[in-house]
Amino acid sequence: MGVIVIAVVRILDLAFNIYMFIVIARALISWVSPDPYNPIVRFLHSATDPVLYRLRRLLPFLQAGAFDFSPIVLLVLLSVAQQLIVGFLLQLAH
């Protein structure tokens, strides 16, 4: 049973890391004027916009002028959630 939980934890940890890289890529492309019809840009927007939109509605002060802090807050929340969930499941496995 512990081996299965560890395998699930590794997959979950990888999923968190991949999504964090997607959020970082989304933040980086927002600094330039990307082609909105590019498939990569459309993927990054579709993967992150629902979460960022909810975060901006929940915490409207995250947009200060031209700078949007919501990707930074999302990365911090993802990192905390990753540490808590992965740590708890690893403790459960052992």
Image (cartoon, helix red, strand yellow):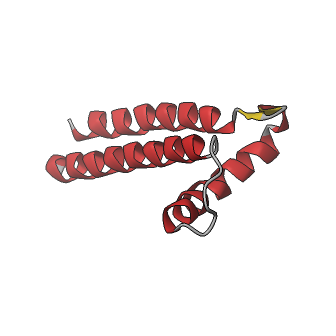
Rendered position, 36 above or below 89: below
The residue closer to the viewer here, 52 or 13, is: 52
The residue shown at (79%, 37%) is 59
Q: Is residue 67 left or right of residue 92?
A: right
The residue shown at (72%, 44%) is 55
Extreme residue toward the left, this view: 3
Quarter assignment of residue 16: top left
Q: Is residue 22 left or right of residue 29?
A: left
The residue shown at (38%, 42%) is 17
Q: Is residue 23 left or right of residue 88?
A: right
Percent x, y for residue 85? 42, 39
Percent x, y for residue 48? 59, 54
The residue shown at (60%, 69%) is 37
Split into 4 quadrants, where in the image is the C terminus? top left
The residue closer to the viewer here, 8 or 37, is: 37
Count how many numbered circles sit on residues in the image: 0
Percent x, y for residue 53? 73, 52
Percent x, y for residue 51? 64, 52
